[in-house]
Image (cartoon, rainbow, N blue to C red):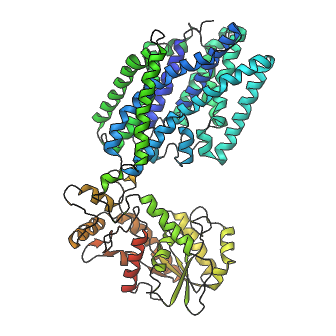
Amino acid sequence: MKINYRPEIDGLRAIAVVSVVLYHAQLSIYGIKPFQGGYIGVDIFFVISGYLITSIILKELFTKGTLSLQLFYERRVRRILPALLLVMLTSLPFAWLLFLPNTFIDFSKSILYSLGFTSNLYFHYTGQEYGAVSGLLKPFLHTWSLSVEEQFYILFPTFLLIIFKFFRKYIVPILLVGFTVSLLFADWGSKNYPSFNFYVLPTRGWQLLAGSLLAYYEINLGHRSKNQKLNLILPFIGLFLILHSIVFFDDKIFHPSLFTLSPVIGVCLIIWFSQKNEIITKILSMKLFVGIGLISYSLYLWHYPIFAFARITEFTQGNILKKFLLGVIILILSILSYYYVERPARNKKNSFKNISIILILTGLIISIFNFTVIYKDGFREKYTNIYFKNNIFNEILKDDSWKFVNNQNIQKFKNTEKLNILIVGDSLSKDLFNVFIQNQDLFKNYEFLRYGNNGNTDALTFDDNYSEKRVKVFEESEVYSQSDFILISEYFNSNKSLDRLENFINIFKNRKKIILTSLPNIYKDDYRHEKLYNLTLFDYFLIRNSDTLYHIDQNIGKNTINLINKEYFENREINKVNKTNKELETISSKYNIRLIYKQDYQCNFINQICHGITDKGFKIHYDNLHYTLEGAKFFGKKIFEINWLKF
């Protein structure tokens, strides 16, 4: 039983891939993103895939009574792997040139998981939120959807074969149950486990099964809809539902969930009710739509890594012509890979044995390269002429900073003869705790504790986690009752957080002595590569000058320290910090509470420097405001020198 070619389905593919590409392009017109729901294109692909794959399987089952899994998987290999391996192979030299070690390792892992069709699980379990800025810089994030489809292709044929042989009468009920359970699971998961829900097959299965149900009914009936009125009206409604979702959905909507039924129903309406003489079918069957649909797989594969590498190198930043050029490059590469890779690989005249040999060799080259990257720690030795004393991996420095406070911070004051200072707040309170604990020999009359020793999970913060319940737990804690002073250190980034601060002060101002600390310096993070590597100004200074300053990290002199500190002074987010600090001044005055400024120990305004490096050559920050352990130790000495506390 031959499968008839339906050009309108290629037209649907065109809408799907164009919407995804435009979504990932992050186009903005007068501050409005017109394709903010473009991620729905992937859902369209899932429905189409479910329909076509089930059609292939069922037509073979109905005509032959059995299914050749070998031939089925051969077709899938011919369809998917050649273009995918080509894009991966092409990306390797760019990764070698552009990536720092930690990002290089992540890149290599993502490729290896993609080859194993489990990249969806990799991105979920590494905490990569789809649509986040960091994700736009990961060249193979888009392979999560291929992994979902491949997992479906691996499991579904055997599942359907068993049902066909032993439960043929119950195919529709079983598919309907699978569809319903998956949809309800997705709706629940979208509210409770959004990342897991987005990436995995169990919550995407209903979209694929929607297409499967259409395929079964079409093959079982021998036709699709014959109702001429519905055939004229419902494709219009289907296209409207799809376009409405692309334009009006956004990243805040629960997805996939019951909301996602809208575009899925739209695709189903077009697939089931489209007819040759119907206008929507004619539009979708136009050469332009069909042409884009034919190259849609290559277009999907190429666009994301090219966008990612362009963002990393800032190739298109602020330049419309370069953005247009990038689009042309993506289109040309997609056309070339379709005609010279996809089509030859799918041509049955070309021996599958020969194709397999090429694919295996290419896969081995890619795998060996990426395993080597991981084994070599991202070829970190490339940076040994820059980094000797410091760690280029700021995430490690961040983790070390949190581990220190969690290990040192027992929730009970030991010495009643000292002034007990309880530090309250978010990650900025962690920074101050590390400052004082590492310099206990300088602050002999004080004992310091931070409220909460499990990150921010059990801390009292003034963000959206602030609540009456948390305040009550704090009030009833032993460490609160033992304290003499409450020292508040928080990143107040909204009026609501300042309102919560006032609520806290009103509760405790007559019970404990409260001291406010200002917002610390926040340094500009729009310099090159920062969002990709989490580089600090210090790191960027080293890399920028690595060609002219040998062993710069190890042999930093006073002149270089001064240059780095001046760079920090010149790259402060002054307006942002001053605005918050003025609000804190108002609150301080209103409640007659002392406010002390972190800038007093962070900067020397006469010499126009802000400390970004210690006098021993260690970086002080692991991002644009938080302190490393070495930085905290350094600032503790500064605080002691200027008598900053003055209790």
Vertical position of residue 126 compared to residue 342: above or below: below
The extreme bottom residue here reads: 417
Where is residue 599? Give x, y as percent.
Answer: 37, 75
Image quadrant occupied by the N terminus: top right
The extreme left residue here reads: 548
- Does residue 201 appear left or right of residue 613 in this picture? right
- Does residue 410 appear left or right of residue 97 in this picture? right
> What is the count of numbered marks?
0
Nearer to us in this view, 159 or 566: 159
Where is residue 308? Give x, y as percent.
Answer: 39, 40
Residue displayed at 51% across by 26% down: 16
Where is residue 612? Give x, y as percent.
Answer: 33, 68
Residue displayed at 57% across by 47% down: 125
Where is residue 641? Give x, y as percent.
Answer: 36, 85
Residue displayed at 64% across by 29% down: 207
Vertical position of residue 473 compared to residue 343: above or below: below
Q: Is residue 28 visible?
A: no
Q: Is residue 321 visible?
A: yes
> Which picture quadrant has residue 287?
top left
Vertical position of residue 464 compared to residue 263: above or below: below
Nearer to us in this view, 395 or 47: 395
